[in-house]
Image (cartoon, rainbow, N blue to C red):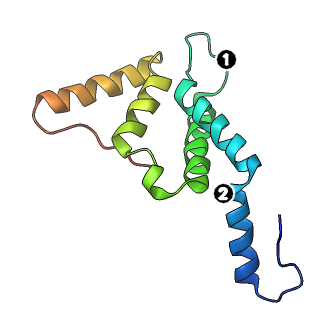
Amino acid sequence: MNLKINTRDAQSVWRDYINHMRTSTKADIELEDLLTSLTSLRISPNFRGNTEGFLLDWLDKIRRYEELTPKSTWFPDPMKKAMLQNAVAHLAMFKRVKLADQLEIAKGRGPLPYQIM
C-alpha cells in the first residue's frame, strides 16, 4: 500500500486508502468470503444463536460487499430479498412473512419490497 502519509491532503489519503481496500489481494479474499457466506448462510431448525444477531450479521455482510464493489455489481433488491428469504426459510415467523408476500402477489399488488432501514 502506497499511502501519501506526509501530505496534508486528507482527501487524497482517504481516496488512496479506499482504493487500496477495494483493489488489494486482501479485498479480493474478503469479497470471495462474503459472497460464499451470503449465498450459503442459513438458519437451520437447530440454530442456537440470536435471530436478530443473525439478520444483522447478514445485512452487515451485504453492506461490506457493497463497500468493496462498484454499484453496477451490487445484487438487485429482489435478489437480496430472495437470498435473505432462503437464509431464514426454516423459521416459522419468516414462513408467515413469505406467505403474506405470496398473498400480496396473488392479489395483484406485487411483492413486498426489500428495504433496509
- The quarter of the picture where residue 83 lies is top left
Q: Residue at x 55, y 11 (%)?
A: 45
Graded by Cα atoms within 10 Å as few (under 14), some (14 to 19) or many (20 or more), the crowding at tag 1 reads: few
Q: Residue at x 41, y 24 (%)?
A: 94
As drawn, is 102 to the left or to the right of 65? left
Q: Quadrant of the N terminus?
A: bottom right
Please provide percent x and percent y for residue 29.
71, 41
Q: Residue at x 63, y 35 (%)?
A: 53
Q: Secondary structure at mark 1?
A: loop
- The quarter of the picture where residue 50 lies is top right
Taking depth in this image into account, of 85 and 50 the one nearest to the observer is 85
Label placed on residue 22: 2
- The quarter of the picture where residue 97 lies is top left
Label placed on residue 37: none
As drawn, is 40 to the left or to the right of 31? left
As drawn, is 105 to the left or to the right of 93? left
Q: Is residue 93 visible?
A: yes
Please provide percent x and percent y for residue 88.
48, 24
Please provide percent x and percent y for residue 54.
61, 31
User: As drawn, which residue projects farthest toward the bottom?
Assistant: 8
Q: Residue at x 72, y 81 (%)?
A: 12
Identify the amino acid type marked 2: Arg
Identify the amino acid type marked 1: Arg
Taking depth in this image into account, of 33 and 77 the one nearest to the observer is 33
Query: In the rendered structure, which disc, 1 or 2, sits on the residue that comes first in sequence?
Result: 2
